[in-house]
Amino acid sequence: MGRNIHFGEERLTLTLTGITSFFAFKRKVHIPYNRIKSIVVDDFQAPRWMLRMPGTSISFLNIYEGSFKYANEWYFLSFEQNRSLLIMELEGHERYQYVVFQMEHPTEAAAEIKGRMHAFSQ
């Protein structure tokens, strides 16, 4: 998997590497902890009529990499399966309303992010 999370003081950074970054047309997404409205680990089915802006999708294989727009909302998607994905809803982010990505141990990552969100808000 070509995705890593770096936990900073005020934000997390999702870094894409290798072929994943090539197809996503992006290497990093920065997400301030105070912009994360909710975070869950769940299945995700991308809306059928999303616009790639820029991004790569092979919808019948559930492969999505990059920026997408649907119903005036921006999504950053990075996954090759639609199960057990880390799904973040953002509020007030400079670009995205949703960031959805695949990674190893998503439940542990979500717990770490929630802990940092809580610590940052105090």
Image: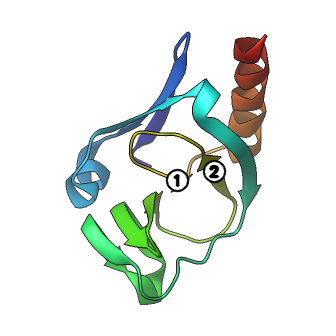
Residue behind mark 2: 89
Instruction: Indicate the colouring scheme.
Output: rainbow
Q: In terms of depth relative to the viewer, which is nearer, 84 or 30? A: 30
Amino acid type shown at disc 1: Gln
Circles 2 and 1 in contact, beta carbons < 8 Å: yes
Percent position (x, y) of residue 114?
Answer: 76, 30
Decide: is 74 above or below 9: below
Q: Kindly state the secondary structure of the residue where label 2 is placed.
A: strand
Badge 2 or badge 1: first in the primary sequence: 2
Q: Tell me if I can see residue 32 in this picture.
A: yes
Residue behind mark 1: 97
Q: Quadrant of residue 24?
A: bottom left
Identify the residue at horizontal 76%, vertical 43% (top origin): 107
Amino acid type shown at disc 2: Glu
Identify the residue at horizontal 53%, vertical 77% (top origin): 46
Percent position (x, y) of residue 9?
Answer: 56, 9
Q: Quadrant of residue 84?
A: bottom right
Percent position (x, y) of residue 22?
Answer: 20, 54
